[in-house]
Image (spheres, coloured by chain):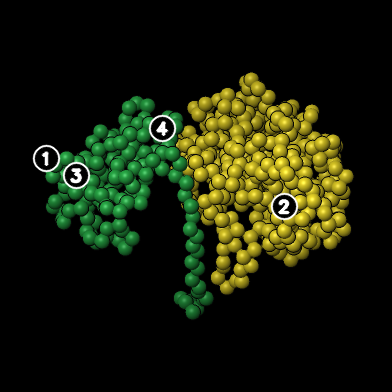
Chain colours: A green, B yellow
Amino acid sequence: MGDGGGLRADLVLEYPFTRTTGPVIGAFLTGLREGVITGIRRSDGTVMVPPVEYDPVTSEPLTEIVEVAACGEVVSWTWVDPPRPQSPWDEPHGLALIMLDGTDTPLLHGVLVGSAAELWTGMRVEAVWRDERVGHICDLAGFAPEVPGAVA
Amino acid sequence: MSGERIAVLGVGQTKYRSTRGDVSIAGLVREAAYRALEDAQLGWGDIDAVVIGKAPDFFEGVMMPELYLADALGCVGKPMLRVHTAGSVGGSTALVAASLVQARIHRRVLTLGFEKQSESNATWALSLPQPFSVSANAGAGGYFSPIIRQYMTRSGAPDLIGCMVAFKDRQNALLNPYAHLHQHDLTFEKVVESPMLWDPIRYSETCPSSDGACAMVLGDEVAGDAATGPVAWVHGTAMRSEANNFPGRDEVNPLASRDCAADVFRQAGITDPRTQVDVVEVYVPFSWYEPMWLESLGFAEPDNGWRMVEDGSTSLDGGDLPVNASGGVLSSNPIGASGMIRFAEAAMQVRGMAGEHQVDGARTALGHAYGGGAQYFAMWVVGSEKP
């Protein structure tokens, strides 16, 4: 018996859907598995990361997949503490829009620092890859402060 | 019909297959939409609004896919509407698009239906358990087989009428390059001997699971007059629905179906459908629905639709009322698109652009779709001349 005396029952629906990614999103995910971040070049020369199949302004199909840098600059951020139960991260972390070098749209990802005091707009960050990669955005463990002089 | 005249300016289809593993959902709809624009000799900028339909979201597990498809359909900054009416959705979607032209809200509307059945399992999606209810887990075949048995009993139809429909539609499909099933080696005997899935529905009497999309560009009278190629003119549109379960319901010949047919033919000025309509694309996912709908639509007297199958009247080869010259739902079933394919094929026939499955001299055609527990109906009559 539930609230008000009415009958209640659980209803759980589950099905293992398949997702066909197509040539563009598929290339992005395949790149992640190989430890490479890819974007797509639009007709005006700008590069979008992650790539999209159709130009958001002109609707033309986009096909020129380009490898982009695995380092860039934080353009906006927030501090997450505590992470929600389904978060990819167990520890408090930054969630930032990161403009990778040579790209024109920012990528949303985690920044792995210990406190909000270590995170600021304009800071340089570089990708941290997982050792085992499957073709998923979480193949990137996150971004960490760039070590000056290191090769990204 | 009142209001603005409506013209079908272009039609685009994908090749229907069990799996389109080479494209995303966006890539699939893009292919059909682009072909419809090409056929209409128009560009994305000529389109004022997009009306899209598909089966319930459970079928692929993408919630509100229309939102992410706006880029692929050239719809950024334009109105986009999604229509939901189960299996009839392809037809209803075309009619919502037509209504926007008819009401002079938009001049040119892109309308599209799609399904990527390979990404899910329709029988699962149609058999979701409900609390405090026993689930038959039967899918569509299990739902419709008792209704078909009821039709067979009350009409006295011979047992193999359904097999005749299935063999005819699969033969027609061989003439349609977009059809999913191209069964060159099929014989009538093989249809009869195929396994019984849901008695009385055999394996070869049921539709396949398909990936695919179908699109049309609809325009107003000015757009129709400006077209360089042939257009189809809409002479009538109608939708009806009813609950799928209530005491006294005629499940074989639902009232909503009869009312919908009466409405669409009245609008089109058709008083004797059998002589005034040249070709019919009717939604037949299970073979026996051809004679059942022929009766409900008024092409045959009650309990006599099966005679039109038996005597070859619905055959593309010499019949006076070819039914599903394209091969029908029995040969291609991307669910959310299946109704729109019927509407589009009707338009192709009166435009004289149906290729090898063209019915010579077709001037008036009916496109039909049904959905749910045979409870949602959508129909249009199109013609080669202005209404």
Query: For the point 57% across and 60% down, which residue is it?
Result: B124
The tag earlier along the polypeptide, 3 or 4, is 4
Query: For the point 19% across and 44% down, which residue is it?
Result: A125
From the viewer's perspective, is residue B226 above or below residue B126? above
Where is residue B141? Give x, y as percent.
Answer: 68, 58
The tag earlier along the polypeptide, 1 or 4, is 4
Crowd around label 2: few <14 · some 14–19 · many ≥20 (10 Å): many
Which amino acid type corresponds to the residue marked 1 in the rendered image? Gly
Crowd around label 1: few <14 · some 14–19 · many ≥20 (10 Å): few
Name the residue tied to disc 2. Answer: B204
Which amino acid type corresponds to the residue marked 4 in the rendered image? Thr
Crowd around label 3: few <14 · some 14–19 · many ≥20 (10 Å): many
Q: CA distance from mark 1 to mark 4?
A: 34 Å
Q: CA distance from mark 2 to mark 4?
A: 41 Å
Which amino acid type corresponds to the residue marked 3 in the rendered image? Val
Query: For the point 71% across and 61% down, which residue is it?
Result: B198
Name the residue tied to disc 1. Answer: A149
Name the residue tied to disc 4. Answer: A63
Where is residue B101? Give x, y as percent.
Answer: 61, 33
- Residue A125, disc: 3
Asked whether residue B183 is in view, the answer is yes
Labels 3 and 4 share a subunit? yes
Labels 2 and 4 share a subunit? no
> Which quadrant of the rendered structure holds the C terminus of chain A?
top left
Which amino acid type corresponds to the residue marked 2 in the rendered image? Ser
Where is residue B36? Give x, y as percent.
Answer: 58, 31
- Residue B283, disc: none
